[in-house]
Image: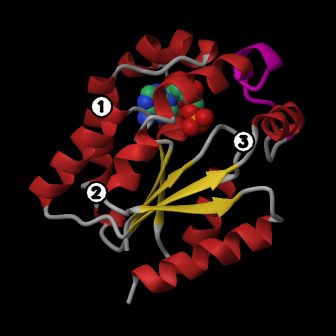
Amino acid sequence: MNIILLGPPGAGKGTQAKRLETERGMKQVSTGDMLRAEVAAGSEIGKKVKAILESGQLVPDEIMVAMIEKRISQPDCAKGFILDGFPRATSQAIVLDEMLKRKQIAINAVILIDVPREELMKRISERVGDDGSRRSDDTPEVLRSRLEVYDAQTKPILPYYERDGRLKKVDGLQSIDDVGRAIDKILDVAGK
Ligand code: AMP
């Protein structure tokens, strides 16, 4: 089963993706994590995207599309993947559909974890990594810019997936466990 998790920064996409990885053996494909790894490794891509990540803007589509195509073609994605952070613009959603069609890969569910903006500001300002570290883009200024990017570029994807009935919404204000249960229900139906 392959799914797309959509939602603003801080909605809990990563948390839910990690749980699905453990419980269902699906693979989390987080473009944010992949980009941060490139920056940490000091690779060519890392050098190109470092400043963009720090500003909260979007990395150009051609870099993202090449990255995602390579990643979902790897054997560990064959049992199912969770796209977390991709697509983030309608242009990416369109290219993704073309790519998946070409590869004869189906997406079983597109799930939006919906959380209002005030709650996101609160959550991100409290977000600290497993090792006690804070992401360099988890500051109030960059968050504001990431939320603006979400509203302007990522939100317009929703009608794209709504049109053909693919979009399922989950209330992200619920507890982590309840969000998980709502996602599980959607996946159980989609898997039948
Ligand atoms: P995330 O960890 O998903 O919040 O992503 C962190 C940052 O990586 C974003 O603020 C963007 O700068 C960049 N990024 C992640 N995914 C994408 C994408 N699909 N398209 C463009 N930029 C992305």
> How far is mark 1 from mark 3, CA to CA?
23 Å
Whether residue 138 appears in magenta in the rendering, the answer is yes
Q: Amino acid at mark 1?
A: Ser
Mark 2 Cα shell of 10 Å, populated few (<14), some (14-19), many (≥20): few
Which residue is disc 3 drawn over?
Answer: 10
Which residue is disc 1 drawn over?
Answer: 91
- Circles 2 and 1: CB distance less than 8 Å? no
Instruction: Give 149 or 75, whichever is nearer the viewer.
Output: 149
Mark 3 Cα shell of 10 Å, populated few (<14), some (14-19), many (≥20): many
Please report the residue visible at 89 percent of the width from the left and 37 percent of the height from the top.
Answer: 126
Query: Which mark sits nearer the N-terminus, 2 or 1?
Result: 2
Q: Quadrant of the N terminus?
A: bottom left
Residue situated furthest front in the rendering: 163
Which dot, 2 or 1, sits closer to the camera? 1
Which dot, 1 or 3, sits closer to the camera? 1
Residue 185 image point, x, y percent: 58, 81
